[in-house]
């Protein structure tokens, strides 16, 4: 990471206000789920994390926010928000913010972290599954309050994967990983039909009982939202039934792959016994 960036806990009211302003910048001025400065501050007093990435002029360019509590009788941390200003993305700041969060809560005795992300966002799928090595615990349709007008959610709603990161078992080699083997190379994609363009055309999934399946998502859902909210919504309608169906039937998300040559992105799901 470039030395001009520093990651640390937010320290004063000015920085908490700057964090609130960054939430609105990232998610839109109509974002109704904005975490206020007072809650960002008091969360720190009970084991929460409100940490920022600061540039060389001490300006806030990204943040991560999460709460520590109990789940199933053990101490866990729920990472609720992470954002980086657009001009500072692709500098691994998101991963560094997560690593800061992990290091902080490990000192509290936390071994498991949870958070959510939108399965349609390929960038986040790659970071979470291939870089951090999380596991998908469940798919939740309409997880957050409907009617939220955040710009990033336009047309596609608030479906989420809930993921679990076992921070007691670090990635030993620290390398980015795509699929661990070749099980998915020849497996048909169940929710798209071939297209003359680089990506498939979304269609309602063929819910086979094969032990290995692939579910395609767009490589850039936000670009599609800008072009057509109808097409963006179709991607949700053509992926939701697949994820719900298979995860309820003892399949797991085994990996995420970006096929740069063909301009496709897809998840691989397998039965747990495979």
Image: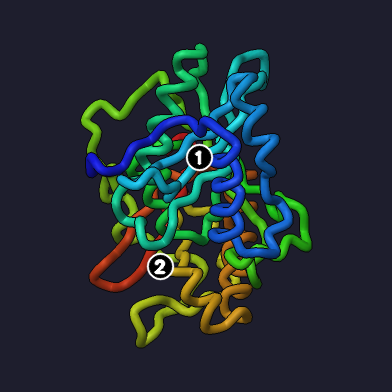
Report the residue at 36% width, 68% height from top: 264
- Horizontal side of 107 relative to 90 (left or right) equals right
Report crowding for label 1: few under 14, some 14 to 19, many 20 or more residues within 10 A (C-alpha).
many
Q: Position of residue 147 (x, y in %)?
A: 78, 63
Report crowding for label 2: few under 14, some 14 to 19, many 20 or more residues within 10 A (C-alpha).
many
Report the residue at 54% width, 59% height from top: 26
Report the residue at 32% width, 60% height from top: 258
**Alpha carbons under labels 2 and 1: distance apart:** 24 Å
Quadrant of the image containing the C terminus: top left
Q: Which residue is mark 1?
A: 64
Question: Splitting the image into 4 quarters, where does residue 170 fall?
Answer: top left
User: Looking at the rendered structure, which numbered label has been put on residue 26?
Assistant: none
Q: Which residue is mark 2?
A: 219
Q: Are marks 2 and 1 in contact (CB under 8 Å)?
A: no
Q: Secondary structure at mark 2?
A: loop
Report the residue at 40% width, 80% height from top: 194
Relative height, residue 250 to residue 44 (above, below): below
Residue 70, visible in the rendered structure: yes
Quadrant of the image containing the N terminus: top left
Residue 1, visible in the rendered structure: no
Q: Nearer the viewer, residue 266 or 183?
A: 266
Q: Secondary structure at mark 1?
A: strand
Q: Position of residue 62 (x, y in %)?
A: 45, 47
Q: Position of residue 76 (x, y in %)?
A: 58, 22
């Amino acid at each position: 990471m470039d030395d001009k960036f520093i990651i640390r806990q937010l320290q004063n009211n000015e920085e908490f206000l700057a964090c609130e302003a960054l939430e609105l910048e990232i998610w839109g001025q109509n974002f109704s789920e904005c975490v206020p400065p007072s809650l960002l501050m008091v969360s720190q007093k009970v084991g929460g994390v409100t940490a920022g990435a600061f540039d060389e002029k001490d300006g806030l360019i990204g943040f991560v926010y999460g709460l520590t509590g109990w789940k199933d009788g053990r101490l866990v941390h729920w990472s609720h928000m992470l954002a980086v200003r657009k001009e500072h993305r692709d500098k691994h700041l998101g991963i560094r913010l997560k690593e800061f969060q992990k290091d902080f809560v490990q000192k509290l005795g936390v071994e498991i972290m949870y958070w959510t992300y939108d399965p349609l966002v390929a960038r986040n799928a790659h970071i979470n599954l291939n870089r951090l090595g999380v596991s998908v615990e469940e798919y939740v349709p309409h997880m957050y309050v409907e009617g939220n007008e955040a710009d990033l959610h336009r047309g596609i709603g608030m479906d989420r994967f809930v993921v679990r990161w076992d921070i007691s078992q670090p990635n030993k080699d620290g390398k980015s990983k795509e699929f661990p083997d070749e099980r998915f190379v020849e497996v048909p994609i169940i929710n798209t039909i071939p297209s003359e363009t680089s990506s498939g055309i979304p269609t309602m999934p063929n819910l086979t009982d094969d032990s290995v399946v692939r579910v395609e998502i767009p490589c850039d859902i936000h670009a599609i939202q800008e072009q057509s909210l109808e097409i963006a919504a179709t991607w949700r309608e053509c992926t939701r039934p697949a994820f719900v169906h298979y995860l309820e039937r003892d399949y797991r998300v085994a990996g995420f792959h970006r096929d740069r040559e063909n301009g496709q992105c897809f998840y691989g799901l397998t039965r747990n016994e495979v």
